[in-house]
Image (tube, grey):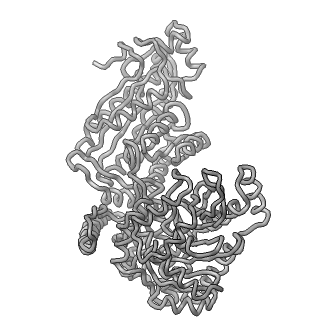
Amino acid sequence: MKNLWSERHAKAARRRYARLGIKRDLALRVYTTRLLGSAPALVLHGGGNTSLKTVMADARGETTEVLRVKGSGRDMASAEPAGLPALRLEPLRRLIDLDRLDGTDMVEALRAACVDGGAPNPSVETLLHAFLPHRFIDHTHANAILALTNQPKGAKICAAVFGRRVGIVPYLRSGFDLARKAHAVYAANPDVEGLILLKHGIVTFGDDAKTAYGRMIDLVSLAEARLAKGRKRVFAAARLPRRIAPVAAVAPIVRGLTAIAEDVHERRFSRPILAFRSGRRIRAFVDGAKVKHYARRGPATPDHAIRVKPWPLVVASPVAGKLDVFTDAAQAAVADYQAAYRAYFARHARRHAGPLAEIDPMPRVVLVPGLGLFGLGATASDAAIAADLACATIDVVTGAEAIGRYQSINEAELFDIEYWSLEQAKLGGKAKGRLAGQVTVVTGGASGIGAATARVFSGEGAQVAVLDRDHAGARAVAADIGGLALACDVTDKAAVARAFARVAETYGGLDIVVSNAGAAWQGRIGEVDDDVLRHSFELNFWAHQSVAQNAVSIMRAQGLGGCLLFNTSKQAVNPGPDFGPYGVAKAATLFLMRQYAVDHGAEGIRSNAVNADRIRSGLLTEKMIGARSKARGLSRRGYMSGNLLGVEVTAADVAQAFVDLALATKTTAAVMTVDGGNIAAALR
């Protein structure tokens, strides 16, 4: 492992934080915390922690010794001083004299010691940092260390690799007992550079940030060197089908089967987002003949259990052309997983004095031989975390098996971590928004109505894919909302199919599509050139059909229903002069919407449209406003606000209408008019 300390970057960090009134030691503490957090082989997604012992003035202006320690669940890679709350050190040190301290009392003691009552919750490892005397302490869950420690003879292996450079601490759950034991091991040999926490991770320390960080890198490098001497081929390969179905075809099936039914009759589901991972090391594990055996060995480190459950789901290989067989087998595998998880909960819940609420029994990781693995979560971020932690476990298992036999903590210990309130608190609450967990595609999403729609759906909690020919514009919108940007000309059927495949690969499926892309061609219908009419139909009708077909294919594979939303325009029911090429195609799309409602309503797929009028956008440009105003004999202002309410309708108004239709779960084949009131365009 490479030591990334840079004197130039360290000085830059000191200068930057000095301008904010942050002292040198805290600036360097943040700098090395970020260095550690930037290495996935050391920590992932809120794992690990760091600390600094220093002095500061409290609210009364009195100088006091404090411990600055990383907040619980905070990401080290993006650490800032505010993410390392300050705790009065002396009351924490006195806790070591207690015989016992349960989790609830420990949390109360930590909160009481906080200098700032509004600071984030300190790490559950805070007492370990407090009881050790060093100024700078680093703690990671390095993969290489875990590969050495997650063994039946982990302590012996570590002693051979590190000698007297480290103390070895037996496995204990994070908190008071582990902190006291770590201190005792250190006190028995105070010359050590760090501590190995069996089946948990590694702690290094020093009087300055550079020393503590350097020791971490040196010791992890020794572990990596030992693993490099192990067997190169670890897992025997299974015989898999030659033709494996693509990820884009498999993901919606997995997503549908792992959705949690809230009301089957009403087709209300809690829908997971999926994140796919593959690669040589992942495939070597997933495609192994004993993948089910290794999958039940437990996660790489205990705190991963809250994100990935005690074990993943393993399904059969999906054979191309036989996805119905895969679906049936996967459905049975999901049912077996749920039964096994409920039995696991029943076995261990009775050991606890108080009542425990069972976490949903769905997997958080699905292994698919021949493809790779899926992480599942309530959001794209949660899914990515589960997938990354699963990949880390594969790396640890591979390393451990290369030199011995992988062995995690036992099932009872895993349960105690998974259902420990202090660990569950790291997950936060449910995903927010009325469309949380729903994947939405918006075509023509780079500007105008499309961009406004993408933003409103994202604000309601949906994961949004922005499709547009203008890739730069789509990227800008997607970056603003944390979505996916895809270059796509919707008149190109192959491009549409590729885009929808990417959406399925990225998020696992699709729930809502806003088919919005369009353009306006003008001309008197009796005089217009046939090519003009054909071009209009390509974009304003056939593109909607292509988008809807691809969406329905994914929705049917999921079996969760879905929602098609079309931007049809008031021209579909109230044609304007010299606007036939646009209006005729839009009228066809309105009836296309109704046909989808008729043909796919029984599958829970709703189909609705918005008829908007006179919305400033890339379609209705200033030039076109001038032309349409002239055609109707109106001023520009009169044309734009020529409705019953006398107001101009905006792209945001149309976007809100799309959201309203998406939420109207018992409405289909409907047209919502957003035009400020145009009686001539009223449906009858």
- Residue at left offset 23%, top offset 49%: 263
- The vertical placement of 630 against 257, above or below, is above
- The vertical placement of 434 against 174, above or below, is above
In the image, 135: left or right of 96? right
- Residue at left offset 60%, top offset 67%: 51
Q: Quadrant of the N terminus?
A: bottom right
Q: Is residue 246 visible?
A: no
> In the picture, residue 594 is in which quadrant?
top left
Asked whether 407 or 483 is in front, the reply is 407
> In the picture, residue 672 is in which quadrant?
top left
- Residue at left offset 45%, top offset 77%: 177
Question: For the view shown, which residue lies furthest in the left direction?
Answer: 265
- Residue at left offset 53%, top offset 60%: 71
Image location of residue 554, percent across then percent down:
36, 51
Asked whether 521 or 132 is in front, the reply is 132
In the image, 613: left or right of 55? left
In the image, 444: left or right of 418? right
> In the picture, residue 675 is in which quadrant?
top left
Image location of residue 451, percent across then percent down:
52, 35
Asked whether 130 or 669 is in front, the reply is 130
Q: Quadrant of the C terminus?
A: top left
Image location of residue 350, percent across then percent down:
24, 72
Question: For the view shown, which residue lies furthest in the top direction?
Answer: 633
Q: Is residue 357 visible?
A: yes
